[in-house]
Image (tube, helix red, strand yellow):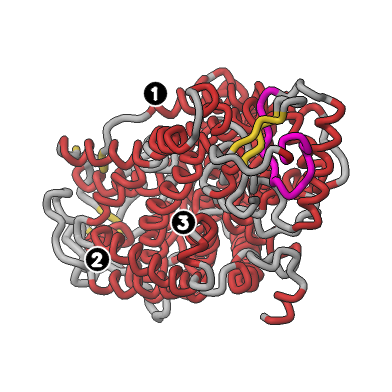
């Protein structure tokens, strides 16, 4: 620990121990559960291989540009999502919005990890508990499929025409993490037969109540798993990036090993090729459907990890001269490649399951928890040595979820530590423990008998439309307020050259337009929250909308605060609030001097042209005439020759 700290470029915040720490952390953060349970289903539903055309189109026009944007200004400033808005204090509320979204999602994301841990522990049995119908939670409607059907004596078996898995479309955003499993549960009312794995999920794991008004009791087994999940998060993040940077070498690579093992096993099973063909055979006519393009845009937006603050946070721990351009080109492609790869794994197993049960593939294919907690566990029971495959599968899900949790949680801790160093400097471990405990308490309602209804509200609204607006403001402010040319020069300071003009076009025009399209599509598809056939009461829907707008409220609030803090007329205040603060720039003095020097040269060449206004530290002689004026009580000096606003820092005078 001490040796690694000596090599840190940024002595105050620290840096990644090695470049792979950042690469693996970004992969772990962006590659989430949606890559496993959302993309394969969406690809099949939206035209198979033809879906890759709109998917890659939006990756190029929106995913990669936003990824490049976020890790660039995060690395340049070495600041987390709140403090980084020193480059435009008027929009600092955008950073707070990122932190709020990450905080809410952390709560229910760890609930999914909790379910995964519970299934993982239950997999260490000779007979998997969801493979039989003779348990206390089973009903008279329980039935078995596949090789276990012949062993059923007290219960009926499901025939090909009696499957309880309907093929439906359940929305198009991140909320599908939970929604599809509820639709599977609602099928109980439509069929007299229910699979053992579905009853295990509904009657044992969830002990599902009748609605959100009947919250029920705490599931103590899940409470213990939730506590364990937060303890593991704390242990991995207690030392910040120095501890998580080591953990990701396992958590980010292990899922790929398991996926490869499952793929090799899957393609050797009978019926697997039918499943893969079902997944990838192109249906070119689907490209004419607007919804296919909308689904592709939404999937790209969520899967790459923009606007959560995690990318900015992780990039802020890079060394200043890290080749951020190379990373931005490589990481989104790896993330999307993982989604496609996972699809082959999932559909090879689903093809085998359809072959074993005599059910067509479209009757077993699903997404969300309905896939990983109902369908896939049932498929595993038909494999030889089924506990082994169950352990591997749920351990893989656990590591995938844990990686994403790292990025979101580190966003919160780094944001507060960077913004309030006078209170939290040297106390990050204690603060991390406190945040873990608070998030644990907030997650308890989600592990009650009616907890899944609470989780559904959080998932449905918390990040459904606010993320798009946050990323839109982020892109527009950097391109048009901070200045795209200035941003290009910042990138040049880091990597030694300016990227091609293509990124200017994207950041200024194409990407904001695509984000607006994604936002409009998402809003048009957003219906009142529901869980299968269950309709939520009005108060629950209002609570959901409150969660949805909560992350946007800091934007106008912080705008008002910043304007009130500034001095002068309204226009003067606006200019000050839209100009970089005195302490904006690289954190390391060596690179900060280069940054100031580049600004001074630009000012001499373009005297009076830059209307945005730049604030510099008075210790650097960027404007001698202004500095000769001394330290005014107003805290600001106008450079007479260059129309340059200089903000005096507290330590400047």
- Secondary structure at badge 2 equals helix
Position of residue 112 measured from the top left corner of the image (x, y, whole percent):
39, 59
How packed is label 1: few (under 14 Cα within 10 Å), some, or many (20 or more)?
Answer: few
Q: Main secondary structure of the magenta part?
A: loop
Magenta-tinted stretch:
611-627
Q: Which numbered disc covers residue 356?
A: 3
Compared to 326, does 270 lie above or below?
Answer: below
Near-viewer residue (340 or 508): 508
Near-viewer residue (39 or 591): 591
Residue 222 magenta-highlighted: no
Q: Which numbered disc covers residue 204?
A: 2
Q: Earlier in the sequence, mark 1 or mark 2?
A: 2
- Secondary structure at badge 1 equals helix
Q: Quadrant of residue 169?
A: top left
Q: CA distance from mark 3 to mark 2?
A: 26 Å
Q: Which numbered disc covers residue 524?
A: 1
Q: Are marks 1 and 2 in contact (CB under 8 Å)?
A: no
- Secondary structure at badge 3 equals helix
Q: Quadrant of residue 1?
A: bottom right
Q: CA distance from mark 1 to mark 2?
A: 36 Å
Instruction: Give me the residue at 54% from left, 37% from top.
Output: 634
Tell me if residue 162 can be seen.
no
Q: Is residue 430 left or right of residue 269?
A: left
Q: Is residue 628 left or right of residue 546?
A: right
Position of residue 650 measured from the top left corner of the image (x, y, whole percent):
58, 52
Q: Earlier in the sequence, mark 3 or mark 2?
A: 2
How packed is label 3: few (under 14 Cα within 10 Å), some, or many (20 or more)?
Answer: some
Instruction: Give me the residue at 37% from left, 73% from top.
Output: 128
Query: What is the total number of numbered labels drawn onto the structure image?
Result: 3
């Amino acid at each position: 620990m001490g040796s690694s700290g000596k090599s840190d470029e940024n002595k105050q915040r620290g840096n990644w121990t090695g470049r792979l720490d950042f690469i693996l952390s970004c992969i772990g953060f962006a590659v989430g559960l949606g890559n496993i349970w959302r993309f394969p289903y969406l690809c099949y539903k939206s035209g198979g291989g033809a879906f890759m055309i709109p998917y890659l189109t939006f990756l190029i026009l929106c995913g990669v540009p936003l990824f490049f944007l976020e890790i660039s200004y995060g690395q340049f400033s070495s600041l987390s999502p709140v403090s980084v808005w020193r480059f435009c204090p008027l929009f600092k509320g955008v950073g707070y919005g990122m932190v709020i979204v990450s905080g809410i999602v952390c709560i229910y994301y760890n609930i999914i990890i909790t379910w995964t841990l519970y299934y993982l522990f239950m997999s260490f049995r000779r007979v998997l508990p969801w493979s039989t119908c003779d348990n206390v939670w089973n009903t008279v409607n329980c039935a078995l499929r596949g090789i276990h059907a012949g062993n059923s004596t007290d219960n009926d078996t499901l025939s090909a025409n009696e499957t309880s898995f309907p093929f439906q479309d359940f929305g198009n955003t991140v909320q599908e993490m939970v929604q599809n499993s509820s639709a599977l549960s609602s099928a109980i009312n439509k069929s007299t037969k229910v699979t053992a794995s579905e009853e295990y999920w509904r009657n044992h794991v969830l002990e599902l109540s009748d609605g959100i008004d009947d919250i029920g009791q705490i599931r103590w087994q899940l409470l213990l798993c939730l506590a364990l999940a937060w303890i593991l998060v704390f242990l991995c993040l207690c030392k910040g990036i120095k501890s998580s940077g080591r953990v990701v070498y396992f958590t980010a690579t292990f899922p790929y090993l398991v996926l490869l093992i499952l793929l090799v096993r899957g393609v050797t099973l009978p019926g697997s090729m039918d499943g893969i063909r079902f997944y990838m055979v192109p249906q070119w006519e689907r490209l004419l459907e607007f919804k296919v393009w909308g689904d592709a845009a939404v999937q790209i937006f969520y899967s790459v990890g923009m606007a959560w603050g995690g990318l900015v946070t992780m990039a802020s721990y890079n060394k200043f001269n890290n080749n951020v351009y190379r990373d931005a080109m490589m990481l989104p492609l790896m993330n999307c490649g993982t989604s496609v790869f996972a699809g082959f794994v999932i559909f090879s197993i689903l093809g085998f399951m359809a072959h074993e049960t005599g059910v067509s593939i479209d009757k077993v294919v699903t997404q969300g928890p309905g896939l990983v907690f109902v369908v896939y566990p049932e498929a595993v029971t038909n494999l030889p040595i089924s506990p082994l495959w169950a352990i591997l599968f749920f351990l893989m899900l656990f590591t995938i979820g844990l990686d994403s949790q790292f990025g979101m949680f580190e966003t919160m801790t780094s944001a507060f530590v960077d913004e309030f160093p006078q209170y939290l400097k040297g106390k990050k471990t204690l603060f991390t423990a406190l945040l873990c405990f608070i998030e644990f308490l907030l997650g308890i309602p989600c592990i009650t008998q009616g907890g899944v209804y609470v989780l559904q509200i959080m998932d449905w609204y918390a990040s459904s439309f606010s993320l798009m607006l946050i990323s839109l403001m982020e892109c527009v402010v950097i391109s048009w307020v901070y200045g795209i040319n200035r941003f290009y020069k910042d990138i040049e300071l880091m990597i030694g050259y300016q990227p091609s003009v293509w990124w200017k076009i994207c950041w200024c025009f194409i990407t904001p337009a695509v984000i607006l399209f994604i936002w409009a599509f998402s809003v048009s598809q957003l219906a009142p929250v529901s869980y299968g056939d269950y309709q939520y009461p009005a108060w629950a829907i209002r609570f959901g909308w409150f969660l949805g707008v909560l992350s946007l409220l800091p934007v106008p609030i912080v705008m008002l605060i910043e304007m009130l803090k500034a001095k002068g007329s309204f226009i003067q205040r606006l200019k000050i609030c839209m100009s970089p603060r005195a302490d904006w720039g690289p954190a390391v003095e060596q690179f900060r001097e280069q940054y100031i020097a580049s600004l001074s040269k630009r000012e001499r060449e373009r005297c009076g042209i830059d209307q945005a206004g730049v604030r510099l530290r008075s210790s650097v002689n960027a404007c001698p005439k202004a500095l000769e004026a001394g330290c005014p009580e107003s805290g600001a000096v106008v450079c007479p020759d260059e129309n340059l606003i200089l903000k005096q820092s507290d330590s400047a005078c």
